[in-house]
Amino acid sequence: MDTLKIAYCYHCGESISGLDLTYDNKHFCCAGCRGVYQILSENNMCAYYSYNDAPGSRFSETKHLAYLDESSIITQLIDYKDKENTIVSFYIPAIHCSSCIWLLEHLYKIDAAIFKSRIDFIKKEVTISFKHDQISLRNLVQTLIHVGYEPSISLHDVVKENSNSVNKDLILKIAIVGFCMGNVMLFSFPEYFGLSNFEKQFKELFAWLNLIFCIPVAFYGAKDYFTSAFNSLKHKHINLDTPLALIVAVLFIRTVLSTVLMQEIGFADTLTGLVFLLLMGKWVKQRTYHHISFDRDYRSYFPIAITTLENKREKPKAINELLIGDRLLIRNGELVPADSILMRGDAWMDMSFVTGETEPQQKTLGEVIYAGGKQIGEAIEVEVVKLASQSYLTSLWNKEQYTDKTTRNFNDSVAKYFSIAVFAIAFTAMGYWLINQDTYKAWAAFTAVIIVACPCVLALSTPFTLSAILSVFDKKGFYVKNTDAVERLAQCNAIFFDKTGTLTTTANAKVTFVGLLTNEEKMLAVSLLNHSSHPLSRQIVNSLNCFSFYPIAKYKETPGKGIKGLINNQMVYAGNQNLLPFAIEPLQKNGVHIVIDGAYKGTFCVEQQWRNALSNLISTLQKRFTLKVLSGDTNKDESTLRTFFEKDVIFKFEQSPHQKLQEVLAQQKMGEKVMMLGDGLNDAGALKQSDFGIALTDNINNFTPGCDAILKGSSLSYLPNFYQLSKDGLKIIKISFAIAIAYNSIGLYFAVQGTLYPLVAAVLMPISTITIISFTTIATRFFARRNQLL
Amino acid sequence: MMILYFLIGCSILMALIFLCAFFWSLKDGQQDDMVTPGIRILFDEEEGIPKVDENESLKD
C-alpha cells in the first residue's frame, strides 16, 4: 500500500495525484503535459520554462482535425496565400504569459517550415506564416495542439468582421486635424500678442495659411457631423450633431469671408480646436476590449466543420454547406450543428447550451435533436432536417422583433431645445442690429452667437464621464460594451435573473454524500475519481480534501455513464445506474453512485452552490426594482430561492429560451426597462431583447452569449453600486451642462453686442472644455468612491 | 526679414513629413499591438539567432 507525496506538475503546475510521471527528473501530472515537455526538450526549447513557473495548461483530449484538409475550409481560414507561403491567424485562448509568447514565436525550432509566427498578446492571436508545401494546415494545428496551444476554430472565424478599420479611420482624422490645429495655433499667436507695425506684412500670409489648414478640418475632419446632421434633418428631428455641424459651417464661412474680403485672421483657431476636441471625445467613446467579445452568437460556439457520412465514408464538411438529408457522425463531446433526427447510436444529449438543464437527456431513435446539443458517450449518426442557419437555436438570433436599442440619450433630447434657444437668441440679436441700421454688426452678432453657444461641451462631457465610469467598472470586473449602454443601465427598473450559473455558481458546488463510507473506502473512491476529468468527479475530489491516493489499474471511463477501476484488488465503480453491473436501490436517484467490491455504498450528490452574499444583494435590489427569476431548470430549488426573495417576486421554471424572451418582451410592453442577467445560450434571446443584458461568467475568457455587459461572478454583489454610479454619471453630465451654459452666457454677452473678437472665442472655448473635463473626471472619482467602487 | 517666409515654409514642410511618418506607422500596423513588443524585447536571444529570412518578413 504505497501512498504518494504531493507534488506539482512541472508543466502546468497542477498538483500531482494518482499517476506520477517522471521525465528528466521532472514530475508531470499527465501524459499530455509530459508529451509537451518531451517535444520542447527535444527541440532545445526549455527556455519556455525559465520565464515563468509552470506556464503550461492542462491537456485536453485529441480532436478530429480531418476537416483542415478540405480546401474549401482552408481558403475560409487563411489570411493570405501565394505560391509558397500561407499566412493564417488563430485565436488561442491558452495564451496567458510571456512564456506563451516565447514558445509560439519560436515555433520554427520545432518545424522549419513555420518560418514566422507573431503574437498579439491582448487579442490572444497568433499569426503564422508557413510553407504549405512542407507542412499542411492540419499538421500545423496538430503541432500547436502538441505544444499545448489549441487554437479555437469556430464558425465565427469564417465570418470575419473587420472592426478595426473604423478606429483607424478616426485616428487618421485626429492626426490630420491635430496637425492643422497645431499649425493654426502657431500662426495665430502673433495675433494674440498683438502685431507691431513691422510684423503686419505677415498678417495676410498667416490669414491665408490658416484658411488653407481649415479646409481639410472642415471637409474631412468634420465630415461625419455634416452627414449625420443632414440625415437627421431628413428624418425631421434634431440630434446633437445638427448644431455642431452648423457651428462648423458658420465658423468656416466666417473665416473664409474675413480672409478673402479683409485679409484678417478669422476663427480658424476656434474651428480647428473645436473639431479636434469633438474627435477626441469620439475616440474616448470608442473604447474597445480586445479580449472580450460582446457580439457573440451561435457561430462562436459552433465548430466550423463536422464529419458527414457519404456512402459510409467519412468526409468533413463545412457547417454552412450542410444540406437537408446529410448524414452526420457526432462523436463524444461534439455539438450537433443543425436540427436533426437520431438515426443510430445511444444518444445522451447535454442540452445545457440550449436549455440550461444540466442533466444529460437520453434520446431515442427517430427523435429530433436540436442544434446545440452536445453528445456525451459513443458516436452517433444523425440526419439533418433543417439547415444550420434556420435551426431552432439560431432562430433566437434571427428574430425580427428585437427593438432597436439605440434609444435617444440625454444629449440628443437636449440638443433640440438647445438649438431652438440658440437660434432664437441669434435672430433676436440680428434683428436688433438690423433695426439699428448696422448690417455689419447684425451679421457679426448672428454668427458670433452661433459660435459661442457651441454645445461642444455637451458633446464632450458625455463621452468623458461615461468612459471614466467604464474604467471604474472595468477594475471591478464589470465590462460594459460602450458608453451608450451605461445610459441604458441607469434607466433600468426591472431585473430578471436566470438561475443556473447566474444565481448559482458552477465553481464551488456543494457536495453531500448519502450513505456511509469508511475512511478506507473514501480513499478508494477518491483514488478512482481523481483520474477522471469530468466536472462532477473534480468537484467531488475537491470537496473531500484527500491528498494521498492509491495506485489504480484497469481504469476505464465510459462517457456519460461513469468510471471504474481496480484499486487494491477491489473493483470500484463511480457513476450513474447505467454503468453498474447490477441493479441497485439507490438512496438518492441523481448523483454519483459508489459501488466497491460489488456492494453499494452510497451516492455523492452535487448541489449547486448559491453565489456569495446573494441574500444581501437581493434584499438591496428588491427595494428599487421589479425582480423575476426565469429558469430553464425544474422547480426543485424553489423553496431555497424563496428564502432570498420576497413573496411577490415571480419565479418561472422550465422556461425555454423563447419563453424567456417573451417574458422580457411582455415586461417591456408594460413600459418597464428590463435588465437581464444570464449566462448561457439559453438566455441569449432574452439578453438581446432586454434593455441591458448582462452575461455572468466566472472566467472572463469563457464564451459568453451576446450582451451589453459581461460581469464577473465574483463582482455580482456590486450590482447595486454599479447601477447607482451609472445614475450618478447622468447627474454629472447634467451638472456639466449647467456649467457649460454659465460659460456660454459670458460669451453670449459679447456676442449679441457684435463685439466678439476671435481671441475671446479662442480663449473661452478651451477654458470651458478644460473645466468640464476636469470636473467630470473629479466628480466621477468622487461618486465612484461614494459607491465603494474605488 | 524676408527669410521668415522661407522659414515658415520649412516649418510646414517638416510638420508634413512627421504627419506622413505617422500615417506610415499607422498603415504599417505599429499602433495595432502596444503590449507584445514590450514583452518580446525581454527574451534572451540564445544560441542561433532565429533564422528569419529578412526578405520573408518584409513580404507582409
Image (cartoon, coloured by chain):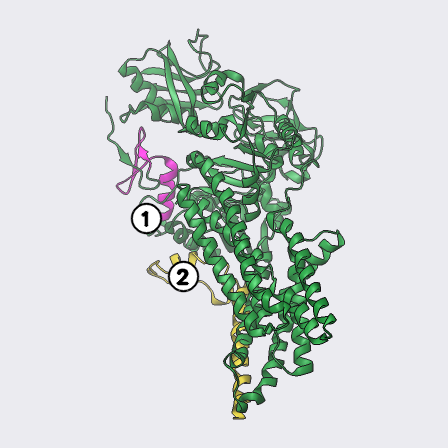
Chain identifier, colour green: A
Question: Callout 1: 10 Å neighbours few (<14), some, many (20+)?
Answer: few
Callout 2: helix, strand or loop?
loop
The three-letter amino acid code for the residue at tag 1 is Asn
Span colored in magenta = A14-41
Residue A119 in view of the camera:
no
The picture's colour for chain B is: yellow
Q: Was residue A450 drawn as part of the magenta stretch in this picture?
A: no
Q: Residue B45: x, y in percent?
A: 34, 61
Q: Which residue position holds label 2?
A: B50
Q: Which residue position holds label 1?
A: A52
Q: Residue A248: x, y in percent?
A: 65, 66
The three-letter amino acid code for the residue at tag 2 is Pro
| Residue at image location 60% in from the left, 39% down from the top | A297
Q: Was residue A24 drawn as part of the magenta stretch in this picture?
A: yes
Q: Nearer the viewer, residue A502 or A562?
A: A502
Q: Nearer the viewer, residue A580 or A746?
A: A746
Res A584 quadrant in image: top left
Image position of A468 with respect to A33: above or below: below
Q: Nearer the viewer, residue A244 or A558?
A: A244
Residue most extreme to the top: A585
